[in-house]
Image (tube, grey):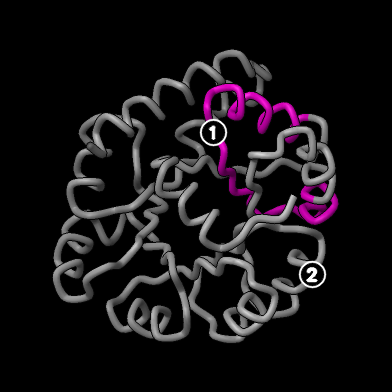
């Protein structure tokens, strides 16, 4: 399935919460994504953090063809070569923990949404000037909601995805959405060690559904 950049942006906006995780076992990775899909997720970030992340991601893309509304992006991408490799594989969007212009060039050439990671206002403006339509604020735990609320009036129209430091609680979500975040990324707070170790995908589905509901109510 091919999605336009605008379709992905709209999905991120509607999602409020984007689960992000990785696993080196294709079957378990598939079970995780299926659980969060059943919990209501339609946008998922698979992070490139294991030696076989590429192979697992390709497996997920093939498997996900049965869910035509599921958007699978790849995260922890840090250079142009890696960007091109995953775009060729079929990634629906590219997320990076850093802001590197060479990645923007590749994404724009292939009409794929580029979401760079930024930690300063200068990086955010540079990313925006180079075509970033959604910007990842990272690490959220260090920057805090106050950073977001401070920069929103300076650069109107920013679409910010917060990753790192977001908790699946009403207090945390209220703080981030109240500051102006478009969506937040949640990883280990959803995919807890206990859930992963016990392969409790039913609990994962329930947890995701609860967090999505809380986030959408909070965002209003």
Quadrant in the picture for residue 147: bottom left
Q: Secondary structure at mark 1?
A: loop
Nearest to the observer: residue 156 or residue 124: 156
> Circle 2: is it few (<14), some (14-19), or many (20+) Cα within 10 Å?
few
Please indicate whether residue 84 sits to the left or right of residue 185 in the image.
right
The numbered dot on residue 106 is none
Q: Nearer the viewer, mark 1 or mark 2?
A: 1
Quadrant in the picture for residue 122: bottom left
The image shows residue 94, relative to residue 207, as above or below, that is below
Q: Residue at x 55, y 66 (%)?
A: 96
Residue 6, image x, y percentages: 51, 60
The numbered dot on residue 41 is 1
- Is there CB contact under 8 Å for labels 1 and 2? no
How far apart marks 1 and 2 lie (CA) works out to: 25 Å
- Asked whether residue 40 is drawn in magenta, I would say yes
- Is there any visible trace of residue 185 in the rendered image? yes
Residue 94, image x, y percentages: 61, 63
Please indicate whether residue 13 sits to the left or right of residue 2 in the image.
left
Q: Which residue is mark 2?
A: 85
> Circle 1: is it few (<14), some (14-19), or many (20+) Cα within 10 Å?
many
Q: Quadrant of the C terminus?
A: top left
- Asked whether residue 173 is drawn in magenta, I would say no
Counting residues from the start of the chain, the first of labels 1 and 2 encountered is 1
Residue 148, image x, y percentages: 22, 61
Nearest to the observer: residue 47 or residue 124: 124
The image shows residue 93, relative to residue 102, as above or below, that is above
Provide the residue span drawn in magenta. Answer: 28-57
């Amino acid at each position: 399935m091919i999605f336009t950049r605008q379709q992905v942006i709209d999905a991120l906006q509607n999602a409020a919460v984007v689960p992000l995780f990785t696993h080196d076992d294709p079957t378990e990775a598939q079970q995780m994504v299926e659980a969060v899909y059943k919990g209501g997720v339609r946008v998922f970030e698979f992070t490139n953090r294991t030696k076989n992340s590429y192979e697992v991601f390709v497996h997920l893309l093939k498997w996900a063809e049965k869910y035509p509304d599921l958007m699978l992006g790849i995260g922890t991408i840090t250079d142009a070569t890696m960007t091109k490799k995953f775009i060729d594989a079929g990634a629906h969007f590219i997320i990076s923990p850093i802001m590197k212009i060479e990645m923007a060039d590749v994404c724009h050439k292939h009409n794929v949404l580029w979401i760079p990671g930024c930690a300063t206002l200068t990086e955010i403006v540079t990313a925006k000037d180079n075509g970033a339509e959604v910007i990842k604020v990272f690490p959220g735990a260090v920057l805090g909601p106050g950073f977001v609320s401070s920069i929103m009036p300076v650069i109107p129209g920013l679409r910010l995805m917060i990753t790192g430091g977001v908790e699946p609680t009403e207090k945390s979500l209220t703080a981030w959405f109240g500051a102006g975040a478009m969506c937040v990324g949640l990883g280990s707070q959803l995919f807890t060690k206990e859930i992963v170790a016990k392969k409790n995908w039913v609990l994962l589905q329930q947890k995701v559904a609860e967090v999505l509901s809380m986030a959408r109510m909070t965002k209003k």
